[in-house]
Amino acid sequence: MADKNYYDILGVGKDASPDDIKSAYRKLAKKYHPDINKEAGATEKFKEINEAYECLSDPQKKSNYDQFGSASGPQGFGGFGGGDFGGFGGFGDFGDLGDIFGNIFGGFGGGSRASQAQRGEDLQVQITLSFEEAVFGVTKEIQVPRYESCSSCSGTGAKNGTEYTKCTECNGTGQVRYTTNSMFGRVVKQGPCKTCNGTGKVIREKCTDCSGNGYKKVNSTISVKVPAGIDDGQVLTMRGKGNCGKRGGEDGDLHIIVKVKEHNLLVRDGYDLSLKLYVPFYTLLLGGEVEIPLAKGTTTLKIPELTQSNTVFKLRGKGIKYLNRETYGNLEVTVIAETPKTLSKADKKVLSSLKDSIKVDSFGRYKDYLKDLKNID
Ligand SMILES: [Zn+2]
Ligand SMILES: [Zn+2]
């Protein structure tokens, strides 16, 4: 189809008027009409003439054909395959497919992505907090390697931010039109200007700080305010602290993934804390006071006498402060009787005497158990 030139087929010039086209078509259609012309190939020729006329007689189709080499216009993406890609070789950096497609689809209309503002990439870092830092909040200074807009040249890449001129190649638009050979013949396309890399500016003298890039890799010190109540796995996002944007694009974001170290004794579940507290069995029998940890510092837990093992004490408001709220979780302490690993002879004697003085009736659940055991069928 690349060789098919509708104008040649009808034998008219590109500037032919609609009337010229019409009369040329009539003359040829009469000459090659299958009913009149019985020569070999006449039918093919007749079809070709009709195809050409159908296109050139329709203002929209004609305009598409003139511009894109196809009556259907640029939508016919399938037709632009193959060698056509070769035409892009000389135009700037087409590092990824996105840019290639951006040119094919976007290039016709005018704006091509290569010359447009480009948002900076988002960055991701991880910070590790102590249990206490997470509970009470902390301000951390972190080092983040990132691209920052060059302050010496205000991101222009030109010395002092002033040593540049308008690109004469594209007249400062950053876009140039160029022709390429496609299956449909010569096609006019638009793409980023390679003289100025689509910026519309030509740097007269490069900024020495950033070698003319307008941005540079730096190790930024960023102050992160971690709010009280942050939990393991949560992500803090700092707007604009990622890589800087290019050609005036907005800066990317910095995502900070928070890791929280575990507490030695307390287990965190959201804003609640729990503690499994093993105490000597006699503390549960006689009652007593045990020092227990809080998110910060310690407090005293009073255990009343005759406390059953596995009793849970709920300390309201002794958990973690909610994120951005003046509310606190709870601390639940489960007390468990622990028996000693060894006993002296004297201990055994004392305990044996207890066996005789404390009747089985005093042990409600054990008594019930013995009763149920007897009633097994
Ligand atoms: Zn240019
Ligand atoms: Zn600079």
Image: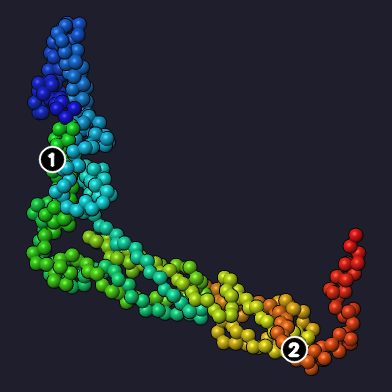
Residue at x-position 60% and y-position 87%: 298
Residue 206, percent across and down?
11, 67
Task: Decide: is 252 above or below 284.
Answer: above
- Seen from the viewer's position, the closer of residues 262 and 200 is 262
Residue shown at 19%/66% (left/top)?
214
Q: What element carries label 1?
A: strand
Query: Circle 1 sits on which residue?
Result: 179
Say whether residue 29 is visible. no
Crowd class of label 2 (few under 14; some 14 to 19; many from 20; radius 10 Å): few
Instruction: Provide the residue designation for mark 2.
Output: 343
Q: Where is residue 372 in the image (x, y as percent from the top left)?
A: 88, 67
Q: Could you say which is closer to the camera, residue 205 or residue 42? A: 42
Q: Nearer the viewer, mark 2 or mark 1?
A: 2
Write down the quadrant of residue 290 in the picture: bottom right
Image quadrant in which the C terminus is located? bottom right
Residue type beneath disc 1: Thr
Q: Position of residue 321 (x, y in %)?
A: 55, 76
Is there CB contact under 8 Å for labels 2 and 1? no
Q: Label 1: few (<14), some or many (≥20) within 10 Å?
A: few
**Residue 275 visible (yes or no):** yes
Q: Distance of mark 2 from mark 1, alpha carbons?
A: 99 Å
Residue furthest to the bottom: 346
Q: Is residue 66 above or below residue 21?
A: below
| Vertical relation: 289 (above or below) 70 | below
Identify the amino acid type marked 2. Answer: Leu
Drawn side of residue 239 relative to residue 21, left or right:
right
Q: Is residue 375 left or right of residue 317?
A: right
Which element type, helix, strand or loop, lies under badge 2? loop
| Residue 100 coordinates in the image, percent (x, y) | 24, 47
